[in-house]
Image: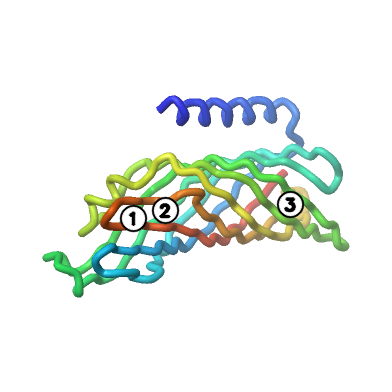
Amino acid sequence: MKKTLLIFCCFCFLLLAQSSFAVSFGVKLGFNTTSQDFTFSQFGDLGKLNKTGAEFGVFLEFPLVSTFSFTTEIRYLQKGEQFDYFNLPNPDPSVDARLSYVSFIALAKLRIPIGGLNLYGLMGPRFDFKVGPKEVVGFEIYTDSYQSPIAGSIIGAGLEFKLGGLGWFLVEGYYGFDWKKLYDSADLVIDSQTVGFLIGLRT
């Protein structure tokens, strides 16, 4: 709990610090596909199980030099898994879990101007806080015990172009992975990765 509070306070400090100096802020929205790898000690690896969810958030961007900036973001995102496990000794025929998270993200952004476009790369840490399971059927015993908060990294790329007086329109994709197992017990280990696609607007 103390570590969680410390992480949250540090992120708030970054937001407050940037609010005084940032030259741009914006919004992002899109979708992600979460891929979770279930490995049972008794039944083996079920493979990667995918579920698509919504994602949106706000960000502040602080330029350090003309081609390099630092951004802090807060996003709401849906993760989860959906699959049938009729081969397992469980009376319920399927798992359908929709898990909601609030993610605090800090990213380094390297920009490459090409004509009127900016190509850019992103990389940095994130901290996901579970805000509640939704539509969980079948695996509540596991989803209620998922790690939260859970830390990870984001690697992404995108492009942005000027949209008249509205600012910069951006399109980006990213890959996110956790630094530790989402769930880890003697019976079951769950790894999680996320691929997301976003559009946005920044001033």
Residue at position x 40%, y 51% from top? 182
Task: Return the residue at label 3.
Answer: 168
Circle number at residue 98 = 1
Estimate how packed mark 3 is, as few (under 14), some (14 to 19) or many (20 or more) residues with alpha carbons within 10 Å: some
Nearer the observer, disc 2 or disc 3?
2
Which of these two is toward me, 93 or 192? 192
- Expressed as whole percent of the image width and height from the top left, the position of residue 50 reads 40, 67
| Quadrant in the picture for residue 189 | bottom left
Residue 62, compared with residue 113, is above or below; it is: above
Q: Amino acid at mark 2?
A: Gln
Q: Give the structural element (helix, strand or loop) at label 1.
A: strand
**The residue tagged with tag 2: helix, strand or loop?**
strand
Mark 3 to mark 1: distance in Å?
32 Å
Identify the element where label 3 is drawn: strand
- Total label count? 3
- Front residue (pair 147, 39): 39
Q: Is residue 164 above or below residue 64?
A: below
In this view, 137 is above or below 180: below
Depth-wise, is mark 3 or mark 1 nearer the camera?
A: 1
